Amino acid sequence: PAPPAWPPWHFAKYSDSLLHPTAANIRTSKLEYYKIYKPFLIGDIVRRSPGRAASSDGTFRIMGRTKSDGEVLVLIIGEEHSIVGWFVTRSESWEELRPGLTAFRDRLERLGTLEQLAAWWSDRCCDGCLDVTKHVLVQIMHG
């Protein structure tokens, strides 16, 4: 008898396999990795302290790309230039910033590192405050 006919060629779609670096596969992989590592990433950031100095800045650009009601992503950066805290607000007013900064202060108290914090830089400068000891940020961090 004759050998069986050779099977016809079959072309798989690249998106059908994780072996092919398509945009859909890369996105799926990143989301799955994030699900695995999220608790470790959050655990790392909540154990960080700024050291002797911190700076903060709010960015509107990143929040414009999200589906959140928030308008401003506030980043707190430590003396080693790493993010030690973040929160989202609807504006950069002190009333909006106070809950996030208070939670950050409480975290530093729990870690026992609040007293190390001696300086804070911000693009908001003094906000018209002539006596630095009465500035809102000083009141929040050191009462």
Image (cartoon, rainbow, N blue to C red):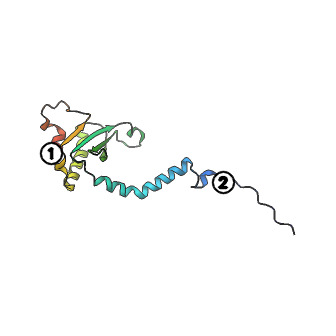
Quadrant (top left, top right, bottom left, bottom right) of the C terminus: top left
Residue 27 left/right relative to 97: right
Where 67 falls versus 106 (above or below)? above
Residue kind at label 1, given as amino acid type = His
Residue located 24% across and 48% down the image: 104
Q: Name the quadrant containing residue 37.
A: bottom left
SS under mark 1: helix
Residue 34: image x %, image y %?
Answer: 43, 54
Q: Which residue is mark 2?
A: 12
Residue kind at label 2, given as amino acid type = Ala
Circle 2 residues within 10 Å: few <14, some 14–19, many ≥20 = few
Q: Which residue is mark 1?
A: 142
Circle 1 residues within 10 Å: few <14, some 14–19, many ≥20 = few
Residue 22 left/right relative to 91: right
Residue 102: image x %, image y %?
Answer: 21, 47
Q: Name the quadrant containing residue 97.
A: top left
